[in-house]
Image (spheres, rainbow, N blue to C red):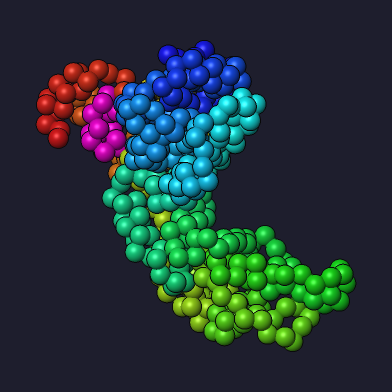
Amino acid sequence: MPSPAPAKAGPPIKVLVVDDDAAHAEAVADSLARVGYECMVATSAGDGMAMLSRDAFEVVVTDLRMKDGTGMDVLAKTKELLPDAEVILVTGHGTVQSAVEAMQQGAFNYLLKPLDLKQLRAVVDNASRTQHLRRANAELSRRLDEKFGFEGVIGNTPQMHDVVDRLRRIAPTDATVLIQGDTGTGKELVAQAIHQNSPRKNRPFVALNCAALSEHILESELFGHVRGAFTDASSDRVGKFEYASGGTLFLDEVGDMPLPTQIKLLRVLESGEITRVGSNEAIKVNVRILSATNRDLEESIKAGAFREDLYHRLKVLTVRLPRLAERAQDIPLLIEHFIQLHSGRHHKKVRSITAAARRRLMAYNWPGNVRQLKNAIESMVVVDFDEVLDLDDLPPELAAPGESARPTDGVGLPALVGRSLSEIEGMFIGETLKATGGNREAAAEMLGIGERTLYRKIKEYGLS
């Protein structure tokens, strides 16, 4: 029978007590329930194994000897149905041999009757902590996969399908990769996804922004320095190349790297060795280089701002990330993703977003790309007070209707003059269907009309 619900926060640990001595089973369950566990009792091995198939228990406390079976049977069935559950065996007939056998079969612990209930609670607490750690590790793994796996590269357009397909082919290799794209397109996220899906995933991922530092500081950050190398060098310092040993070094905004540093980076790529600033000792390094830029490096080469030999070293493989305006059909998907992300992060409940707010977000040009959209949704979630994101929650740059509105295939307002209202309506519906990837439910919501009305107008204007 179920015990009272535990008072502690979070999902309670569910415990199954299996013992054909009903009074003893109830005493064990009551003792555990008093400290917050959710307990159920089975008074035979058969009933216990049947309950294992119907419910997800994290801990099983079972007697070893019962009339219709043994605790070893319950242990085996638990490991078959619930491999992560912890099993504690209890018996009045304990022997060293049975204890060894139980532990070999995966039992968490082994206790003797008469039970010391305080000791039992301590053992169950340990099993509970093991479950908590397992849950935490699983959640961490899930978040890593979500954030750094290919599933974290959000998009359902052909452009993003092409990007993900290319990443799947690139990640398992050890080749250098140049990631190209405008500011805010997600270049570091892609670099992390490549690393997380590579043979180096369990080694460091180290990122360095080459645009943010002067030549001398950048060289010290990359290669390290020895004591006395310059005025403030009071001790030896390991650089990013050494920190990333065995892993991946991500050079963001590599197109802004000073020319003298480019020469030193090229030598490292050619030799596999670095020399700390102020030292003559060569140090072997083993890192995969990923780099990113928002510049046209071929134009930089022509202008004498970037070395051609380094360019070819860095671009063994390339990935180009499209601007958000080039994949506007992904905006509804990104909106939902960022609402879920930020509502969880800021502990805010968001039930929905209005069609008007969604239309405004769809109409904006997003010069800052995905990063700007992400920040806009975060702002909306934070300032919202009624669990519905609406126009009054929009950040200032989106507050004025039509501001930075995205043109549709070059058809601006002057080009619409002279056309009939029905013709303009047909064009607008067609563009909205394109923007939603043909999703009529989403298109109807954006247009502020019912789906039946949309179907009728699609037929009326010959749209497909």
Does residue 357 show up magenta in the picture? no
Q: As rendered, which of 361 and 241 lies closer to the eye?
A: 241
Compared to 134, does 218 lie above or below? below
Please state if 149 lies on the left or on the right of 128 as rendered. Answer: left
Location of residue 243 in the rendering, given as x and y in whole percent from the top left corner: 65, 67
Q: Quadrant of the N terminus?
A: top left
Compared to 80, does 223 lie above or below? below
Location of residue 444 in the rendering, given as x and y in whole percent from the top left corner: 27, 24
Location of residue 448 in the rendering, given as x and y in whole percent from the top left corner: 32, 20
Compared to 312, does 419 lie above or below? above
Which SS type dominates the magenta stretch?
Answer: helix
Which residue is rendered at x = 35% and y = 56% of the image?
163
Q: As rendered, which of 28 and 385 lies closer to the eye?
A: 28
Which residue is rendered at x = 58% and y = 26% of the image?
114
Please state if 9 lies on the left or on the right of 16 as rendered. Answer: right
Please state if 20 lies on the left or on the right of 187 as rendered. Answer: left
Which residue is rendered at x = 76% and y = 70% of the image?
237
Query: Looking at the image, can residue 225 be seen?
Result: yes
Does residue 433 show up magenta in the picture? yes
Which residue is rendered at x = 14% and y = 21% of the image?
456
Q: Quadrant of the C terminus?
A: top left
Query: Looking at the image, can residue 253 be seen?
Result: no
Location of residue 385 in the rendering, given as x and y in whole percent from the top left corner: 56, 17
Compared to 20, does 309 lie above or below? below
What range of the chain is rendered magenta? 430-444
